[in-house]
Each structure stands twice: as C-alpha cells, then as structure tokens.
Image: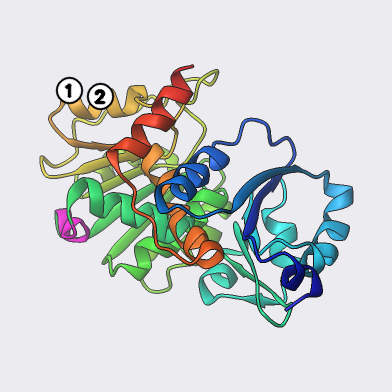
Amino acid sequence: MSDSVLRDPTPRAFVVGHPIAHSRSPLIHGHWLAEHGIPGSYERRDVTPAAFPDFMRALPDSGFRGGNVTIPHKEAAFARADILTPRAKAIGAVNTLVVEPDGRIRGDNTDAPGFCAHLDHSLGSAWPARAGGTALVLGAGGAARAIVVGLAERGLRRIWVANRTAARAEAVAALAPGIGAALAWDDLPAALGGTGLLVNTTSLGMRGQPPLALDLSPLPAEAAVADIVYAPLETELLAAARRRGLSAVDGLGMLLHQAVPGFEAWFGARPAVTPELRDRIVADLAG
C-alpha cells in the first residue's frame, strides 16, 4: 500500500473524465456514503487526454483507493491498468479502477453486469429466456461492446448486433463467440419477430438527437425493450414499447447498478440501488 494511503485512512474515490461537471456519479456515491455512515469522499477530476497518463502514474500515491473512468478515457485506462479483469479484456475498455494494496492498478468494466443487474431488477431473473433467448443490440460503440459481453455471460442463445457500418457490427458480435452475429440495418424489421430483448445503445433518441425510427409491431408480446439513454428518461422508443404493452427498461438503472461494484471495492460496503436513490437522480436530471 502506498505511503499516502497509510497516512490518510479516510477512503477516497473519484470519477475522471473531460468534461466532468455533468457526471451524476458523485450524487450516487455521496448518497451511499451517507446511507452507510462512511466518512469518505467521492470527487470529480477533470483531466485532459494529454494529462491522463500522468494521472494514472500518480494514482498509487494519490491517496485514492480508485475511481470511475468516463469519456474520453475508458480506452486509455484499459491501456494503462496493471491488471485487467477478463471482462475488461473482452470489452477493451475500463470504467472502474481499483488501487490494490501493492500499488498496482486493477481495471474492470462494470457496465456489463450493471446492465444485466438492471434487467434483473426490472424484468425478473428469467428475462434471458424471453422469445427463445434472443437479443438484438442496436449500435456498435463502447456501450454495445459491454452489453454484448454481459448478455453472453448470462447465457443467451443468440445475440444479433445491428449497425449501419457492417464491419463494426461484426467486430462487436465477435465478442460473443458462437452466439453473436452481425445484422444489416435494413434487415431489422425481419429480425424483430424473433427478438426477446431489443437494446438501443445508439445516441438516437437522446436529447438533441433525432429519434430512433423503428416500427416495434413485429416484436413478440413477451419481448422487452431497453434503451441506455437516460436524458430523456423515457425516449420515444420506450414510449412506443409501452404503447404496445411491452416491458420497457430505461437507461438510468444501468448507471446506478454499474456503480455498485466500485463502491464496494473502495469503501468496503455493498450498496443497494433503492427507489430513494433513483428518485434523487431523477430529480437532479429534471433540474
């Protein structure tokens, strides 16, 4: 353990990004610190890409026990962590850092289990079996990579990945060997009929972006629709799903659930995602 940690036993963690003022992570972790009566801190750190290597080098002696990594540093953190979890290796990006007692930095990606934990909370633990265990993921960015890995870990039988750039869809589908496959964007309507879980990981539907124009009528009655967008909390895609009587899962729960493993690692207590926490973040988003 570094000397700085020994001198200051008060647990400290951070979220690092650029820009970072918009991050709700301090609200989430601050809520849990108060709830558990832990005299720790969780701080924003605005670090430019040029300064990020120095930030990582200084981390073992900074007094921080670790922290969250957000845009644009997830790939840089992946490249500079001393230890990577198998999940982080598969995804190729890190969103959670832990300073080990020997000073090495462990990188993990909690987006994958966070997304699945939110589905468990919203749909019940039997959701992977919907419509024969087939999921359709829209988009091929970092979030899609994490979600495909998470879905594969939960034992789905088939995961389709659709993106307007075929090569990117194929690269993400390859993260689920044997069950992942790329799908041309124009073939979406035909694929929806056999989809038990539809997941939007694109920016379409986000505030300031065009909506995701997709006719959901072919989806089976037992299908669920998830959108990782949480501003607005109910996208047009989710509204359309509700109008059809389908289960709709918003993006806020993924943000909340992905934070649980990091808090436990840094502060020594496993927090719960409660209605009170959700209401607090919803109120902040509305403000």
| Cα–Cα span, label 1 and label 2 | 5 Å
Is the residue marked by circle 2 packed among few (<14), some (14-19), or many (20+) residues within 10 Å? Answer: some
- In the rendered view, does 91 fall on the left or right side of 80? left
Q: Position of residue 231 (x, y in %)?
A: 46, 26
- In the rendered view, does 263 fall on the left or right side of 157? right
> Is residue 12 something one can see in this rendering?
yes
Q: Where is residue 129 in the image (x, y as percent from the top left)?
A: 16, 60
Quadrant of the image occupied by residue 224: top left
**Which stretch did the figure color magenta?**
125-130
Q: Is mark 1 on a helix, strand or loop?
A: helix
| Quadrant for the N terminus in the image | bottom right
Give the label on residue 240, or none.
2
Is the residue marked by circle 1 packed among few (<14), some (14-19), or many (20+) residues within 10 Å? Answer: few
Name the residue: 89% across, 49% down. 50
Amino acid of disc 2? Ala
Q: Does the magenta stretch include residue 128?
A: yes
Q: Where is residue 81 in the image (x, y as percent from the top left)?
A: 72, 70
Q: Identify the residue position indicated by label 1 in the image.
A: 243
Q: What element carries label 2?
A: helix
Name the residue: 62% across, 30% down. 22
For the view shown, which residue lies furthest in the bottom direction?
102
Q: How is the image coloured?
A: rainbow
